[in-house]
Image (tube, rainbow, N blue to C red):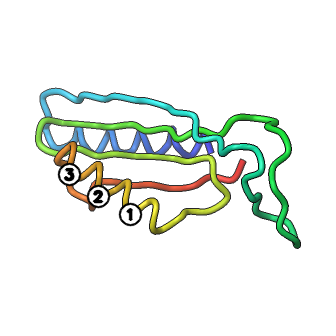
Amino acid sequence: MKKSALIIFVLITIIIRGTFASELKAGAAKTDITPPLGFPMAGYYTPRGATDVHDELYARAVVLDDGKTKLVLVTCDNISPFPKAYGEVRNKIEKELNIPAENIIICATHT
């Protein structure tokens, strides 16, 4: 996943720089999204709640801005995307940061 994210970042940077942008700004953040103990875990035949935490789960974001266009990339340590939750996050980003929904990419990675 890290290699794919790096490739995507480099390609986007090349594309944005190709538009004769005078400056590229970037910001990054990460936050812990580990659910509480007892939260149902995916991948089991019968429902099973988490009894401990092996590794924390994170949401990571990168925002790129060339002065004309802003792009947001978010990855979440989830087994699959949650359309309703991701839609709400996308709407909040669009409203609070004034970034169009089509410039917001949210994905899940099962690690």
Image spot of residue 43 (x, y percent): 80, 64
CB atoms of marks 2 and 1 within 8 Å:
yes
Count of numbered circles on the image: 3
Image spot of residue 40 (x, y percent): 75, 59
Label 2 crowd bin: few (<14), some (14–19), many (20+), radius 10 Å: some
- Left or right of 79? Residue 58 is left
Q: Which residue is mark 2?
A: 91
SS for tag 1?
Answer: helix
Q: What amino acid type should be assigned to the residue bearing mark 1?
A: Gly
CB atoms of marks 2 and 3 within 8 Å:
yes
Task: Name the residue: 21% across, 45% down.
Answer: 96
- Left or right of 93? Residue 89 is right
CB atoms of marks 1 and 3 within 8 Å:
no
Q: Which mark is residue 95?
A: 3
Q: Where on the picture, by quarter, is residue 62? A: top left
Image spot of residue 73 (x, y percent): 40, 46
Q: CA distance from mark 1 to mark 3?
A: 12 Å
Task: Name the residue: 82% across, 36% down.
Answer: 54
Task: Name the residue: 16% across, 44% down.
Answer: 19
Image spot of residue 90 (x, y percent): 34, 56
Q: Which residue is mark 1?
A: 87
SS for tag 2?
Answer: helix
Out of 62 and 39, give the one closest to the viewer.
39
